[in-house]
Amino acid sequence: MARMDSFSTVIRTASHEQHVEAETSTFMSDLLGGRLGVDAYVRYTEQLWFVYEALEAGAEALASDPVTGPFIQPELFRLPALERDLTHLRGADWRTGLTALPATRAYADRVRECAEQWPAGYIAHHYTRYLGDLSGGQIIRDKAERTWGFARKGDGVRFYVFEGIANPAAFKRGYRELLDGVRADDLEKQRIVAECRDAFALNTAVFRALGDEFPLSA
Ligand code: HEM
């Protein structure tokens, strides 16, 4: 990595390969290709609930952290939207029988561990999910609306709708500035980048498990 690269560039470049892997995973390809039933989408949304529960349960305590605090922005919080989606997808008793796949459990556990013990590491998880949701998430939303007939930006896909962010491109620019100004030394930054790679791998593992659960019968 070139010495002059900004941290936001370093972290994006370092995770590029994993991004391609996640994006082209069998489950994601099948989902985006409109080849899966809504049950697969529901199961995926359930897994997201466990991940965001871990991300956002720890957020309040991190808001006052000198390194991680600036990243904690309520307009990003996804849990209320996810719970509305799950109410729509699973019914009012959506919590009953909601289960995390082992891969999801491992992912959520790691997020929680960072939130509690290594705030700077939490930034890697924050970046991997929220910047992705603001980017590729919009492609997933569009596909889900078309494939399963959800109302545009309505129940079922509210997870992908950031009501509090009018201009996602501007928000992402601001987010990259936060990354560039992160108060960590070079070694700590390297550790954050490594954690980001791990965060992508944890996502890919969830996709693999979902792919196993929803194979195409072809
Ligand atoms: C099929 C699924 C996906 C598609 C189509 C997709 C697409 C995209 C696109 C087009 C961008 C660039 C946006 C921009 O430059 O403003 C992006 C960025 C990003 N995506 Fe994805 N993505 C997908 C899956 C994922 C997954 C599973 C993750 C991780 C959990 C992820 C994490 C990210 C992150 C962190 C960025 C921001 C990169 C940066 O600018 O620093 N994406 N994605």
Image (cartoon, rainbow, N blue to C red):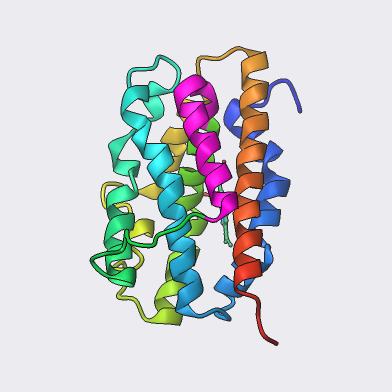
* Residue located at (40% from left, 29% from top): 71
Residue 113 on the magenta span: yes
Quadrant in the picture for the N terminus: top right
Query: So how many labels did they put on this image?
Result: 0
Q: Main secondary structure of the magenta part?
A: helix
Quadrant in the picture for the C terminus: bottom right
* Front residue (pair 52, 23): 52
Q: Is residue 180 above or below residue 43?
A: above
> Is residue 84 at least partly visible in the picture?
yes
* Front residue (pair 153, 84): 84
Q: Is residue 59 left or right of residue 139?
A: left
> Is residue 161 at least partly visible in the picture?
no
* Residue located at (35% from left, 36% from top): 57
Q: Furthest-left residue in view? A: 92
Residue 176 point in image, percent of width and height: 50, 33
Residue 42 point in image, percent of width and height: 43, 69
* Residue located at (33% from left, 23% from top): 61
Residue 34 point in image, percent of width and height: 55, 79
Look at the image and give the residue range highlighted in magenta: 101-123
Q: Furthest-front residue in view? A: 97
* Front residue (pair 192, 170): 192
Q: Furthest-bottom residue in view? A: 218
* Residue located at (67% from left, 38% from top): 197
Residue 64 point in image, percent of width and height: 33, 18
**Quadrant in the picture for residue 27:** bottom right
Residue 148 on the magenta span: no
Q: Is residue 103 left or right of residue 64?
A: right
Q: Is residue 65 above or below residue 32?
A: above
